[in-house]
Image (cartoon, grey):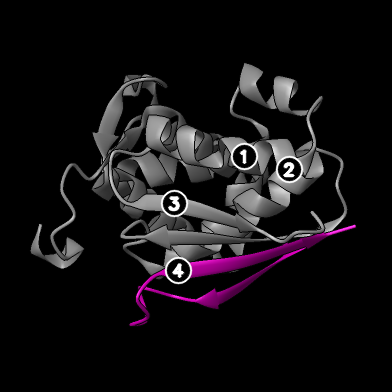
Amino acid sequence: MSEHDGIDNYLLKGGIISGYFEFIKSEHGADAQAECISETGINPKDIKSNDYYSGEMNENVLQWISGNYGIHELKKAGNFTAKNLGCLTHLVRFANIRFFLRKAKDSYEETFQFGRISVLNDEFGKKATVIFKDSNIIEESCEAWIGAFEGFFEITRTKGTVKKTRCQVKGDEYCEYKLAWE
């Protein structure tokens, strides 16, 4: 895994990968999903939501989406996946964005077996900085995270914005996302 700069246990739960396949089917149709399955060699029927799979599988699906529909489509894919992760999303609807951010580290560590996340909140509770270290391996992942944060705003019925201000993939020490809400 030399391309992953020493990231060990580059694994994530299958629910993320399955979510991207569901996005493809929902947004682009069953034929597009079948094409992705054929071209990546990954069959979502073989993926169990709570089992861990290679992060490279996830990269392949994200790169397929980007290659076929453009990198902008990854925000939509991240948003869709964040909003459709099963019963968790229904519970989150009863929480606010601050609650979600307090739980972000534990949720990340439960889902991804690589990298780390930290959340820095401002004292007034209307902004946060989310930092990922050794989490995004490809630019496509960065775009999907922007969409996921936007999806979490939608789930919690919060009007907010997400801005990426640093990128480890592009040479920064870590990836940094600035979140602000009303």
Q: Earlier in the sequence, mark 1 or mark 3?
A: 1
In contact (CB < 8 Å): disc 1 and disc 2? yes
Under circle 2, the secondary element is helix
Quadrant into which the N terminus falls: bottom left
Extreme residue in the left direction: 2
Residue 155, placed above or below residue 7: above
Give x and y (percent) for residue 74: 56, 59
124 sits to left or right of 48: right
Q: Which residue is mark 4?
A: 175
Question: Distance between the Cα atoms at labels 4 and 1?
Answer: 19 Å
Q: Which mark is residue 117?
A: 3
Q: Quadrant of residue 90?
A: top right
Local packing at callout 1 (Cα closer than 10 Å; few below 14, some 14-19, many 20+) is some
Whether residue 26 is visible to the viewer of this picture, yes or no, is no
Q: Which residues are magenta?
A: 161-182
On whether residue 93 falls in the magenta region, the answer is no
Q: Amino acid at mark 3?
A: Ile
Q: Which residue is mark 2?
A: 98
Whether residue 57 is visible to the viewer of this picture, yes or no, is yes
Q: Residue at x 63, y 22 (%)?
A: 88
Question: Distance between the Cα atoms at labels 1 and 2?
Answer: 6 Å
Q: Quadrant of residue 155?
A: top right
Q: Amino acid at mark 4?
A: Cys
Question: Distance between the Cα atoms at labels 3 and 2?
Answer: 16 Å
Q: Earlier in the sequence, mark 3 or mark 4?
A: 3
Q: Amino acid at mark 1?
A: Arg
Residue 30, placed above or below residue 5: above
Q: Amino acid at mark 2?
A: Arg
Under circle 4, the secondary element is strand
